[in-house]
Image (spheres, rainbow, N blue to C red):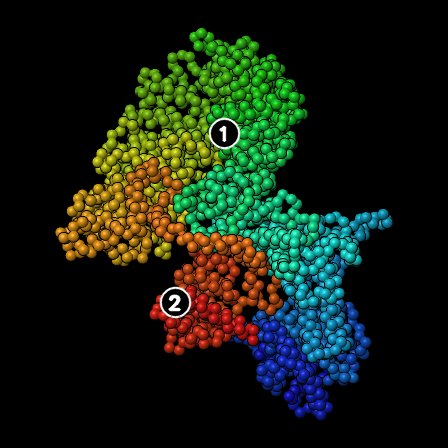
Amino acid sequence: MAAASIDCDDNGGLTSQFQVLIQRSCSLLHHFDGLNWNVVKPSQTDGHSKTADAAGDNDNEAMNGNEENDDDDQSDSSSDDGMMMFGGGLLDSDSDNEDDLMMMNSGLNDANEQDEYYEEEDGEEEEEEDDAAMLKRASSVHVALLTSLSSTSFVKDGRELVQSLVSSMLSPTSTTTDNGDDEDLNKLITTISSVLLKSSNDYLPKRMSDERKRKIGLTNSLLAVQYLLHLLNTSSTSVSSSSSSLLGWKVVILPLLFNTTTTKSFNDTLLQTALLNLISPSSIKMTQDQLGYCQDVCQLCVLAVEQLTSTAAAAVGAVTSNHSRQSQLILVCDVLIRLYDGMNKLLGKQQQRGGGGEELALPTKCVDSVANAIHLVIVKVIRGICYAQVEQDCGGSNKEDNQSVVLLEPLLSLEAVRPVTGMLLPKLYPSGSVGSGNLKEQQQQTRAVELWNEILLLLSPYSEEVVSFDKRKCCRNWESVAPMTATAILCILLPSFRGMELPTVPATGDNNDNHASSTVCRPVFQPSVWALIRQSLKRCGDTDSFGGDGGDSGGRGTSLLSRGARDGGSSTFGYDDDVSTYDRAAIDQLLRRRSAHILRLLIEYERDTLLRSGSKKKGKGKGRQGKDNQDGRIDKQKRGDMWMKYVLCFEMLEMEIEIHLVDQVWTTVKELSSEASNLEGVNDSTNELPLIVWEDVASLLCRVLLSDAPTLRKLGLYRFLCGDSGIQVTSVATEEDQDGNGRTFMRKAESKCKVKKKSGGASVPITTVSVSFVLDIVMRSYDSIVGTKVGTNMQIDEGGQQKSEKVADLLSEFLSNYVIALAASSEDGSELSEFMTRILAVITTLKWRSLVLLFRAVATAVDQSASHKYTLEQETVRAAIKDMLSTFSSGGAPRSLQEGLRQDLSSMLKNAVPWTRPDASIVLDVLSLYPPQDDLVDNTDNETHSLTRSALATWIVGLGDGQWANNAAPVCASAYVMGEMLPFNDKIDILSGVNTLERTLGMAISLLCTLTGNASEMLWPAIFKGLQKPPSASSHKAIRSMILLEWGCREEALSGMGNGDIVTDKQNCMLPPPPNVEFLLNHAVQLLMSQVMEIKTSLGGRAEKSGATRSQASGQASSYIYTLINQIRVLHLSFPSSSSISLAVNAILSQCADSLKQPNSDETDGPIETVVTLTLCYASLSCDAKFEDAKELEKLLSICEAIMTCELSQAKGKSMRRDAVQALRSIFHYAKWGSLSLIVPMINEAARKQPGGAELASGSIQQIYEKILTSANEAVDSTPVIALPPLFACTTSCGEYLVELEDAGANGTSLLSSIKVISETLFAVLKEETASSTWMHMLSSMCNLLFSPKLLLHEYQNSYVDGDRDNMPVMESFEKLIEMGSALKPHINIVAVSYISVAWLGNKDSSDQDVGLAAIPYRDNIAELLVYKEPKFDESSANQNSTKDRHGILPQTTDGSSITRAFVLSFLSKLPSPENMSDVVLKELVHHIILKLIDACCLPPAKGKPFITGSEEYSKMMRSWQALCLLSRFVTSDIANEVAQKVFKAMSNLSHGQIRYFMECFTVQCTRKHPSVFGQSFINEIRRNDLSLQYVSSLMIIGGNLTVGSYSNDFFHSKSDKKIKEILCGVLPWLSSTQGFSRAIAQLLVYKLIPLVVDVENNSGGGAIEKDDAVLRSVYLFLQQNQDMSRVRVKQQSFFDSYDVDTACQFEGLLAFEVDDGDEASPVHMVDAIKECLADVYKEVHDEDAPEWKQMEDLLISAEGGNQDESVPENDELVNFQRKILPVDALDLRIQSLHENKKFNAAGNKKQGLIVCATLVDKVPNLAGLARTAEIFAAETLVLPNTLVKKQDDFKSISASANDWIDMEECKEENLLVWLHKKKAEGYTIVGLEQTSSSKCLTRFNFPDKVVLLLGKEKEGIPVEFLSAVDQCIEIPQLGIIRSLNVHVSGALTIWEYTSQMMKRSKR
């Protein structure tokens, strides 16, 4: 080949050469000209031509290589992706070279003619070339350019020159060289550096795109390195082929790639690969120089890794990011792999040629050198990941400061282990190399032992000691990093190492000589390996959070890569520098899967070893010794089998989420549990497998109990609590059920796998289960499903009957049994003490419902086993009390649950071992949890309260020596009053609010005194100390005495005479307290009143500065006053006969009345005086103060009017602080509305009693009340929260009286206007008071007022009838409440509906004609409420249990999600019959509801599929039909035709059997009521021939009930009824139905109907159908005489006889059905019942006794079973469930190829070049089957019409998790043609599966490598418009009559044929 040459000027030859090369490369590769070429004319001088030719010849010789190399040698010169290497025959092999040279010469000739460079126009830029193809073409062009270079005469040594160039570029500060031409070399260095290090774009057009500039930069960098390699070949003495040697790697490529300054330029992996491909180690000729080069390259690689792992080296370099270090490490590994493969190929060639020892010596040394380098890199990477460097602290100057060290964390992250496991280890230790002899060599053995030593160090626990090598110590995240690294390496090493004898103890230094003296054994027997496996398998991740409420959320196939780091880890690699930021759940999942893989590798090898040893020793052992050896081998084999079962179970539970598949493992789990031992897990012997212990089984159970799928968690929990895991627990299941053979979860099909071995042995005792497992696993699993849509109910199919079981009940029983067993298992109670201590520590970690269940079960159990004591440390109890108080105060716990926890805690304390030296502060902390009963808003029942107090008393009395409480209680009371127990505050300030700590401590002391039984004797002395003299408002002693007096009264310990007893005289009149008590009460009242008067002092006065507003001032001040008033009320209630209290409050009320009537003359203190007066008035009224004269009503009205006129204005001359103003306003509103809330009921009562009250009511009372309502409506926003309840009470009292006045006709016209104001006010209060504990009481009061029968009827008559829909405040209020309740507050709906449903019925004295009138305006609301479903209760709702008092009218069986609609159903059930009902109610209310519901039921489901069970649509459909069943009695002739038409239309839709049950019941009831209408419709439908099977089944059930059931008399009036004949004609054809169920019922109907039509006894005819008499008679006789049909008929008849439609259409019956997981009714459908019947009949027929010869044969086979070959069973024979493969990809060990992206599937196999296009397939089962098939045969991609289909349940079920492992792509049909053409452009062949005139037979078609398989539509095939894009159509040969196959089957056959051809092709 003639190559053009390039001349060089003497002044700058090398630089000019390189610049010309760059210019021409850009021109040839990227199609633009106009550069300033230095063109050489074709006529060259002889010398130059000769030189050029010589250079070309030399280059060609170097490129062609040795001619004696075989084809493999030439193929070695290309990389994996087809890129040709420089020097590897590129010019001869690349077909584009001639074109490139022609283009180059053309560019040279035409260059001078170009004045301007080519400018690309917008939108006309050519399509960007693929990077790999571009670099391949660039390499070809560069070779052609380099061959045109002339020799450079002044270059004496090419190697020296290149080394100088490279070192100068990498070290810019060094500019001098040995060459005399320093200036030219510096210029060349600058030019090449600009290209290499900066990718200079100086020669490129400015308007060029950035992408093209990037590609030109890549090619320029490639050319620069090739140019340096070309210079390296140049020598003054000889021209060698060193470009093909490793010298180029050593001198040029690796220094550039490994140097940190070039990282940014060479970070493109394609460029890195292209540079490494320039030299092929396998194509060199091995010499001593090449050996040195190889060793130098290895040293460069090791030094590069040291730079990445050493802190000192890294400080100098520029590699700082984790990603950069990872990329550099991958590059080093790539170099070593290339070198190792090349040297091995050279060695293999020499061995094939039969070379001698000398010829093999150099390649062998090269291989060993590279292997040692790989080994060193592996070790350094491990250390760089797991160990922190320890450096000396430079700050210390003395020698003694040597102890001061600086700990530097590792530079490499966990990501760095993947190049080791994915690249280096598989090369150095290939799988199965044990048998090849490689590891028997000394060096290889030494490396293996050294690497094993590193692994043993990783398996060691964390230590603070410095490891001797490299001055390193364990990193701070050792617990995660070390096992992650160790498991990753073991997964790769064990296939080679598991047969080796390796040390069991790690060496402590670099010298591993101490291994010689250590114990050696195989890895399977090493304790440290088993410790790693067990610790990893039991890791559960972050159990505080789980994935989604349902479905799969990562339990299968996810890894650390896919889940990533929580706090933004690397998106590329999935790791971050800091392990603490990792997703702990992902790390633990990865460790579990790797450990399971390791365990499988070990057990499989051990079982194979036993099999081999057994076959060798078989027959050799004789006598007893031989028998012992055989028994020992059998025992070892049994252990191996058990461990393999364990692995199979673990992999199943780890990877599977299909419930019915997971439910198959429990027989094996139970077997493992029975084999578990309480011994240590690892034996002392080093040649036996460890025993399976309970902790191993617990790790197995964790996988299902803590699965990401909530349905699996519930399943596992249920199975565990039923004893199916082998634990001996008491459950509701029978022994047969516990074996797992009698139950099927969720009505799923049982496993088809044959159970070959049933579990044997006794169950494991319940005490074997550890405390941590119960609390951390079982309780956490239950806690995760509580309050979710998954629920805690299990639907069980047991013996053909569906039943519901509550997991909560099973768990409660298990916990009780567990506690009782713990109490009985140990005498010292240590285990029970541990359990009880742990319980008190989980208060804040569990949800409330879970916590209550736990405490209740445990408290019940400890009460039952009271004789067994346990210990609770005082500090443990203190911490528990703190947690409880914190949670209680957060407002998240319902009040009823709080009381339950208090009671259970008291039981636990009662049964604990009494404290010998109790701490009084801890005892009082406990008692602070137990306020008096009247302080609880939920009003706990007396029994619960008394039980709690009794338990506390028992605990208190038992403390210390039994007398501690009697001694401590009075001391604590006195110390409390005197300030010795709790210091006094410096100042009592109303703005500071109530001292909560002071009041809580006083309450606890009062309770302590009460529990001792001598409260009076202990409390009164302390109270006297503070109240023995008239106190002042600031007396701390008096205040605390008052607190003790208050709490003593609340505990009912201080009342009446002071000793807790109320004393009465003979007339049963209460006697007054004794004088000393009266004396104290007088002082107490004075104290309280003086504290009220303290308002003047606290809030008065001038402010020196304007203080900032305090947001809490108003609340604290009003709370303070609220406490004072409550104290006065408590004293009054406790001492009702006290004269001092009654006199005082009456006097105060009189003074306040006078003061309010007379305006305050002192304007300066007016506002404060007004507030004080109102407060005293409220306080006196709280104590039932009354006016003594007869004009009480007038005085009350005057006081009420005076209070309404009070205003809070700014005092003259006073400047008050802002916080004081806020406090004063708060107290004013609280006192004002509090006083009115008490005065208004007094006015109402007085008006009712006083003569003439009605007349007054029409005037002054009404006017005052209207003012009150208006003021209340305006004051809601400005009223403090604490004053809202009084405001609310005042409003409701006014409203009640106004409603009463409506009966008298006093204000009927304005009533609705007043109600509207009242409603607005009450809603405003509720909005502000949402967090109040009185909220539910206020809601009930509001509903009681608004939803009264009188008011509803008044609104109907005065607004609805008149058409005034805007004036309906009651209806508006109801709709507003329903709207409020829809947002997770169902208790609002329950209360509202419970009141209004009663009001709809009217008053008790209402006639039937009036019943329901008031409900007519609400008919649409009623229809919606009938399908309403309560959402799950909010666990934090404090009011969720406050509606139980409204449930009294509901049946006990009412489900919690149906309470609201149950009230509506109750209302409808109480309506009179249609005959007695008003026509208005019947038509406008009931008929309207029926038609609206049935219209909703007629809507077909979307996409023609039934509603998903548990969905909102399913729930509405179910509840609609249930309501219709109840309303069936109201279907009159007016609407019968319309209803019949719509019912049968709805019946034709697809729906679930549970819904169809109620649909059929409604139809039967309506047909009984209107047989002519519904009967004719039924006959018309049954005679149709286009019915679906589901529709037919419903018609058959209806027909069976009407003709042969108990309702036949209602349907047939006589035997001559014409309907009999018509039904018989309609049923006869269904005797041949393909549905067995319909056939069976049709046989019964025909059998019953024929005798009614034909005289079956008389053969002479005379029947109704004379011509067909004989046929009908023969059919009847056949049905009568056939035994099988007789059996079926008898069973079916019993079903129809017991079919109870009436119950299903009654109120109580509807609510009595069992509910499913979605809280919907789950009746046994007739279809299911008769299917079970048919199955029973079949079993009866076919399960008869076998003949005797068959029984004898079975006995003989059984007898010979013991002599069968004792081979190791296969894995499929060990377990009875479908095995689940743990994909290799799930171990996260591989690193993505540098050239490929996800070319391997999850199983580790390379994907095929097959894309299955199913865009035209629309049926989900076919798509799911294709997904499964495509994944099995490693297809590249599956194309779907919509990727959302993979979320559907049927797709998941049929695909069997294939959607998790195969890539799926979406392509719509409208985009298919474009997509096909795109794939053709990418090199794919489009193959269509279609029968055409040109189609080829499938077996005769040769598939290309890259294929797109296009599948057609189900019936039409591939449309014509897509056939144009198909390259070839193929068809499947057919031998039968049917001319088509299912599309999934066709696709599967074609996929297999493609796979078969590819497998045969790969073998060739």
Residue at figure coordinates x 58%, y 47% from the top left: 675
Q: Relative to 16, say whether 1001 is above or below.
A: above
Q: How far across and how far down the image is residue 1902, in percent?
A: 48, 76
Quarter containing the N terminus: bottom right
Q: Relative to 925, say whether 1821 is above or below.
A: below
Q: Earlier in the sequence, mark 2 or mark 1?
A: 1
Q: Is residue 1092 visible?
A: no
Residue with the most extreme top position: 1066
How far apart marks 2 and 1 lie (CA) works out to 77 Å
Question: Which secondary structure lies at badge 1?
Answer: helix
Q: Relative to 313, say whether 997 is above or below.
A: above
Q: Nearer the viewer, mark 2 or mark 1?
A: 2
Quarter-of-image position of residue 1912:
bottom left
Circle 2: residue type: Leu
Residue at figure coordinates x 48%, y 25% from the top left: 943
Q: Which residue is mark 1?
A: 1282
Q: Which mark is residue 1941?
A: 2
Circle 1: residue type: Ile
Along the line of sight, the residue nearer the viewer: 1473 or 1570: 1570
Residue at figure coordinates x 20%, y 56% from the top left: 1671
Density class for disc 2 (Cα within 10 Å; few <14, some 14-19, many ≥20) is few
Along the line of sight, the residue nearer the viewer: 1481 or 964: 964
Q: Which mark is residue 1537?
A: none
